[in-house]
Amino acid sequence: VSIHSENSLKSASTIKVPILHAYMIQRSKGRFFENSNHKKLIEKMIRFSSNSSTNTIIDLLGGLTKIQKILIKTNLYKQIRLIEYIPDDGRTYLNTISVSDLNLLFSKLWFQKVIGAKFSEEKNMLVSAEMLNLLKLPGHPWLKDRIKEGTCYSNNKTVKLWDKTGFVKGSNGNAGIVEINTPFGRKAYSIVIFIERKDYY
């Protein structure tokens, strides 16, 4: 099911997942040597949505334009635009993405093909598992996801969720993967949801 999946939207903090994607690609290429500080920054960026950590990772990868080029080369992203760093207050309005972009990313992630055919199946599997692990870590208790919180899944311990939220003035989003029990066994679904107000700036 898709509604306006190709529309370009304010990405808010969901942009941090593609930035993580670019980080993993460059690390896999040996473009930098990962240290313990990098790992801490990556965890803070995804788990706690740290803006300062995100900006440091952007610099590590060579800046916004460089990351944009890395991501475009994957052929997963069509509407992504990395224009600005994320200020401390999180009010970033120029970076954009689409539901389709994020859905393709999460699909590749789930099927363990996230860094592409240039890398081995084993490397793709290890990187995919690492990214999924980051996306399932609990964040701030006050930061509620929109996929599970307050839904019929809230108290169901068999439901697994890997996701990233994003909110700025005029755009409220959540992107991730939910795995549930069905009459046909365990099934996983990529869910990307954005609510946008065009008249709200």
Image: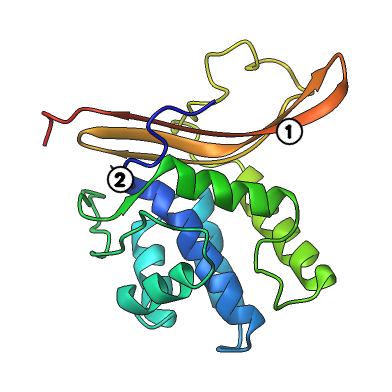
80 w.r.t. 110: above or below = below
Q: How is the image coloured?
A: rainbow
In the rendered structure, the answer to whether residue 17 lies left or right of residue 108 reads left
Q: Quadrant of the N terminus?
A: top right
Residue at x-position 59% and y-position 74%: 25
Q: Quadrant of the C terminus?
A: top left
Q: Earlier in the sequence, mark 1 or mark 2?
A: 2
Circles 1 and 2, Cβ within 8 Å, touching? The answer is no
What percent of the width, then of the height, locates residue 48? 47, 49
Residue hosting label 1: 188
What percent of the width, then of the height, locates residue 159? 73, 25
Residue at x-position 62% and y-position 17%: 154
Q: Looking at numbered disc 2 in the image, what kind of residue is underneath it?
A: Ser
What percent of the width, then of the height, locates residue 93? 20, 49
Element class at badge 1: strand
The local crowd at label 1, few if under 14, some if 14 to 19, many if 20 or more residues have their Cα within 10 Å, is some
Residue at x-position 68% and y-position 15%: 155
Q: Looking at numbered disc 1 in the image, what kind of residue is underneath it?
A: Ala
Residue at x-position 75% and y-position 51%: 111
191 w.r.t. 74: above or below = above
**Tag shown at residue 128:** none
Distance (Cα) linking label 1 and label 2 = 26 Å
| Observer-nearest of 82 and 27 | 82
Mark 1 vs mark 2, foreground winner is 2
The picture quadrant where one finds residue 184 is top right
| Observer-nearest of 165 and 25 | 25
Which residue is most to the top? 152
The picture quadrant where one finds residue 157 is top right
Residue hosting label 2: 8
Tell me if residue 27 can be seen: yes
| Observer-nearest of 45 and 101 | 101
